[in-house]
Every structure is written in structure tokens, then in C-alpha cells.
Amino acid sequence: MPPMTLLQTIVMGLIQIVAVLIVVFIMVPLLTFAERKVIGYAQVRLGATRTASGRKGFTASMNRGMWAMGKVPVLSFFRGLPVFIADAVKLITKEDIIPAKADRAVFTLAPILSVVAAFGVFAAIAYYPGVMFYMPKNWPLIGGLPFNGAIADVNVGLLFILGLASVGVYGIVLGAWASNSKYPLLGGLRSAAQIVSYEVPLTLSLLPAVILAGTLNFKNMSVILATGQGMSPLAVIPLFIGFFVYLTCGFAETNRVPFDLPEAETELVAGFHTEYSGMKFGFFYLAEYANMIVVSCLATAFFFGGYYLLPFGLQRIIPASVPFLGQPSFLFFMAKVSLILFAFIWVRATLPRYRYDQLMEVGWKYLIPLTLVNLFIAAVIRYAF
Amino acid sequence: MFKSEELEINLGPQHPSTHGVLRVKLRLDGEVVVACTPVIGYLHRGVEKICENKTFFQGQVWTDRMDYVAAISNNLGWVEGVEKLFGIEAPRRARYIRTMLTEMNRIASHLLWLATHALDIGAMTVFLYAFRERELLLDLFEAFCGARLTTTAFRIGGLREDLPPGFIKQARAFQEVFPDRLEEYETLLSENRIWKKRTVGVARINAEDCIALGVTGPVLRAAGVPYDIRKAFPSAAYAEMDFEIPTRPEADTYARYLVRLAEMRQSHRIIQQCLDGLPEGPVMAKIPKILKSEVNEVYHAIEAPKGELGYYFVGEKGGLNPYRMHVRAPSFVNLQALPKMIEGRLLADVIAAIGTLDVVLGEIDR
């Protein structure tokens, strides 16, 4: 195949970016819907059920029939789905208020920073190792070109992701400071301390994976860690520990329960985004959910077996000759990401919130020593076996 | 170059976890509370003054609107206070039904406390679980008197009507499910590490301070003092009931949580006894159509879900209204303990402390 021209590279890049963005922009609203539903069912209620068509129509009459029989209608489960459209319309059309005493430039910049950092990370994530499919031959310009599983196959992919993800905290801190109001200030201080503290164990928990895989390239890392090529079978131990530590830190990084102190609703009203409204608030909201997806993608790729069926490098049990189960698949990746996203929601329905000092204690006294020990184990395994 | 100063912050009156319109002025050093001043009065309606201009029959309606999550307890205090003033005695069946409904109301009030307290600390699922059971109780109140919240359940001299048909069955159904549901809350919270971290040792107030500040109810009992007016000065049918006063020595938020859960179990026991031993007979004593008071004064206290709820009546010669009426509201007195509980602690503990005190602003501001 001849090398691509500059134009072809740009066009293919744009196509991939748009494709990923579309998937993310579909996933975020679906995630909010899933959150409503899962929490609803965890709390013996139905969640959102009444946005779809009015009293007429097929689903409406079916639902009425089932209600009349004393049963909860199955179709009503999906009737809440259009809520996300309503949400988006609401956020976009709402008045965008900037407080009189706020620093206008920074106040506007903050949500942009948050959302750019959250979405930029998707560039380096590989959803499939290698080429997903080729463009149809008869298309002009891009005919026959490969559609890769990642937008950019960066050779220091992990560094890029960690670096960009840590920019997101500036959005929160700057937004809180620029609001010039007391509750956001407290929320901003909390999140600065929290996210900076938890970035340490977060990064440290990823290091065993880097040591075991011997590369920083996202695609190679996830393939090596899942198939366990060249790794000792003992590598399961550091990967297993690393998975849970990483997920815990991921909860803290995305400000989710039980670490949702920056926006602790019952303490700080809405934390750092108290003064935000309209689409500026919507950006913070988008960024939070996009970050959840990023954390889930990373946990899946590095610890949970990535594109292969079995997690923690156990894929070696299944020989590659087995059809489907032995092969990498985009479906496995998405299923695992969904599972971890479900865990995010499940935890939110179950656990109370930590207090600020306890959160710091968990981070510095337990997680960091644990990750260091884990790092040591991984190094020993890498060196000795 | 840098100067540090304390941050003054208003928690409320429109804050999600101040349970209404409580405003707490806080001075913060970072996250640590340096000083705390509760500011009240945003819901003041002058209930006591209004009651002085209403007849003894009319005044009861206003008591519903004080502690609106425990309206039946308020009704009981008013009705028994007036009965004491006029020397009326309600029939035994009426007293049993009053006891039963008051205990149901205690459970409903404690459920609301559990719901909001857990929500404040971040455990949002307990909120809906507790509301599910409270709904069963509100249905019972509705069956009994037609209202769910502002009940005006009793009448001076007894009850307006006997229990409606089906009430006993409905109440027994509730009795059946409730112990299991209590277990359910406990599985979610009692041994939850985060819940314990947030509550054990938080917002302590010892027995001496409680007594000095006049704090009563579960807060006092969680400090190890077994003071319960149902036992100390029994009214209604409490003297005939077999129940215990749960206490804990720790005096912290977790102890108060355990005490209130244990109290719900005891209330459940009392309701069972009322249902099993409900005597036959009339529910209304013979009382005159118009009550005219003498020069007389009466203080009558009952054990409301939040603590000692006292009614003080002064009668005048031939008066149709109380000459003077005062309510000793447990939430109002208990709120005094707030600064003592939280000064020197973290902001998040303020929320836990307000929740654990179980204040209702309708009662504080009256």
C-alpha cells in the first residue's frame, strides 16, 4: 500500500475524531440514563419513565394495559430515554449567568479547559489493536485506507493520557476561584487537594502495568498485559491489586461517590460549579462523565484484559486458535467498560461520602504505601521470573 | 506577604442540608469550624400567641404545624395538657389508640430522620428505603383521620371516632414487615466502614453538658442518661406498656443512630401490645360543649420523638382560651447543643451534627 498523502492523513484523522466524538457524545447521555435507571432500581423506584410520546401511540397503550394488569410495563423502562435530549435542550437554552463579581475570562475558560482535557484523552485510547476496518475501495480520496482502533497511536500514550487528565483539575480550581464566591472556593480547594493527592497513587498504580509490559504505548500495553506474552504467571498479583487501587483513585479523580467532596451536595451546595449555569455547567457535567469513561477505558485496557475475554493477563489459558473467545474484539472492550461504569453507578447508590481529612488519610496512608508495595512486587516479578 | 484570615460563611437558610430554614453562621479556618452561631426565626408564625386567641378545641390544629413530621405527638401533648387543666379523663380505649398512633408517629419521625441524616452524609439509598416504610405509616394516619401530615388526630376527652374498619389489619401488616425493613437499613449502614468513619466520635456531647443545656430525647439517651418521659411521668397508656429505654454511653453520632434504631424497635413493640390488648369501650368521655377555664396553670410534658415536648397552660376565670400558652419544643432546646458539638471540628461534621440533632424548624421557630 502506498504511504498516505498529507491530505489523506488529515481527512482520515478527522473521520476518526468525529467517529470517536460521536460515540462519546452518545455514551455520555446513555450513561446519565443508565445512572438514573440503575440508581432508581437500587432504590426501589423506577427512575425516569415519562418523557416519550404522549397518551397516544403503541407504547403508550401497551404501557396502560400493563399498568391495568398491575404490572410494571417493560416498555416504560425505555420511556425515560429521551430525557437526555430534554437535558441537552435545557442546558443549551438556559440563560448563561456570569456573576457580577466573577472573573469573566477565567470563568469562561474553566469549563472549556475541563471539557477539552476530558475529551482530548480519547485521542490516545486504542479501542481495538490494529485496524478495525478499511474504507470502501470505490470512495474517492480515502478509498481503501485503514480505519485504526485509535485516533493517534502515540508511543508514550500513557504519559499523554496522564498529562492531559491532570490538566482537568485546573478547570475545576480556576472555575471555583473565578466564581468569587465562598462555597465554590471551598469546593475548589477541596478538589485541588484531592485530585493532586490522588494523582500520586493513580500514577503509581499504573506503573506496575508499565513495568510488566515494558512499553508506554497504549495499544501494545493492553495487548501484552491481556495475553501475558513474556510475562510470568505471577503477574496476576500486581495486576489484580493495581486494578482495585486504580479504580479507587479513579473514583477520586472523577469526583464520584464516595469521594465526591468537591461537589458535596449536602455540604457545599454544588461545590465548584455552584455559580455555573447553562452550557457552562453542562461542560463540567460532560467532563465528569467523559472522565468516568476514560477511567473505565484505562482500567479495562491495562488491568481488565482489554480487548480479550479474560482479565489480569489470564488470557493465555485460552489459545489464540479458539474462534471469537481467543481473539481480540471491540465487543469485549465495550462490555468491560460498561461493567466498570456500572460499578461507578452501583457504588454511588450504596456508599456514603468520606470526610475531607479521612479522604486524605485514605490516599496518603493506605493507597500510596499499597501502590509502592505493588510496584515492588511487579519489579521483582519482572526481574526474577 | 500572604495574610490568612478566617472565612465567614452562611450555612442556610437556603441550604440543602439544614432541614428547612435553619441558618448557621460559621467562621471557618480552612475547613475547621472556629465559631458557630445558629440563627433562627425564619419560620416564626407566633403559634403560641395565636393559640391564646383560639379556644381550647381550635388550638390543637396549630400544634400540627409545629413539628410537622410528628404532628400526632404534638396533638397528644396538647390534648392531654388541656385534659389535665380541666380534670377530664379519656376512656381507656381512647388512651390505647392514642398510644398506638403516637408510637407510629415516632417511627415515622425517626424514619424521616434516618432518611435525611443518611442523605446528608451521602448514603442516598437509605433515604428512599426509609420513605417507603414511612409511606405505610402515612397511609395508616390517612385511614384514621383523613390527613397524612397535619393530622389533628385526637379530641379533648378522647377521639372523634373509633378506628375505621380494616385499620387493625393494615396496622398488623405494617407490624409484619417493619422488623425486616429495619434490618435492611442496618445492613446498609451499621457496619459500613465509611458510615462509621463519618459518625463514630463525631459531634460528641456528654451527659453533663446535655443536662446543663436542657437537651432531652435520643440525644440525651445516647449520652447514657435513661430519661424518658414515657417511663418517668407516664401518660396515655404508657404505664401499662412493657418496653425498654435504649441508651448508649458513647454520646456520639453513631450512638444516637443506634439509640434511634433501638427506639423504633421499642415503638414497634408498644404498637404490638396496643394492637393485642386493645380494650373495648367508648372512645370519648362526656365533656361539656364549651370549656371555660378557672385561674389555674398546668405543665404537661410528653416524650416526643425529638425529646421532651411540654405544654404550659395558664387559665383565667371563665376564659374560653388559654390566658397564656407556651411550648417547650425539644428541637429548640436541643439546637443549643450545636455549637458545643462542632466547634473545632470540620465543616462536614456540621452537617452530621445538624442531622443527628434531628431538628424541625417548624418547631424551633413556632
Image (spheres, grey):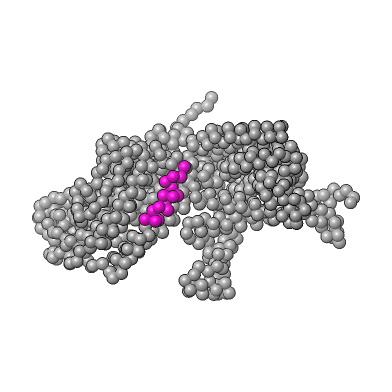
- Picture coordinates of residue B16 (x, y %)? 44, 49
Q: Residue at x 71, y 46 (%)?
A: A226
Q: Residue furthest right?
A: A2
Tally the marks.
0
Q: Closer to the camera, A19 or B248? A: B248
**What residue appears at the point 40 percent right and 48 percent down from the top-left corner?**
B117
Q: Quadrant of residue B339?
A: top left
- Residue A93 location (% of width, % of height): 58, 57
Magenta span dominant secondary structure: helix
Q: Which residues are magenta?
A: B179-193
Position of residue B202 relative to residue A71, above or below, is above
- Residue B46 position in % (x across, y down): 27, 52
The outermost residue toward the top is B1
Q: Is residue A238 visible?
A: yes
Relative to A72, say whether B354 is above or below: above
Residue nearest the viewer, comparing A232 with A292: A232
Residue A65 as seen in the image, left or right of residue A88 = left
The image position of residue B66, as x and y in percent, is: 29, 53
In-image side of A98 versus B267 (left or right): right
Decide: is B59 above or below A303: below
Q: Quadrant of residue B201 in the image?
A: top left
Q: Residue at x 19, y 48 (%)?
A: B233
B12 magenta-colored: no
What residue is shown at x 62% (from left), y 42% (from top)? Answer: A240
Residue A178 visible: no
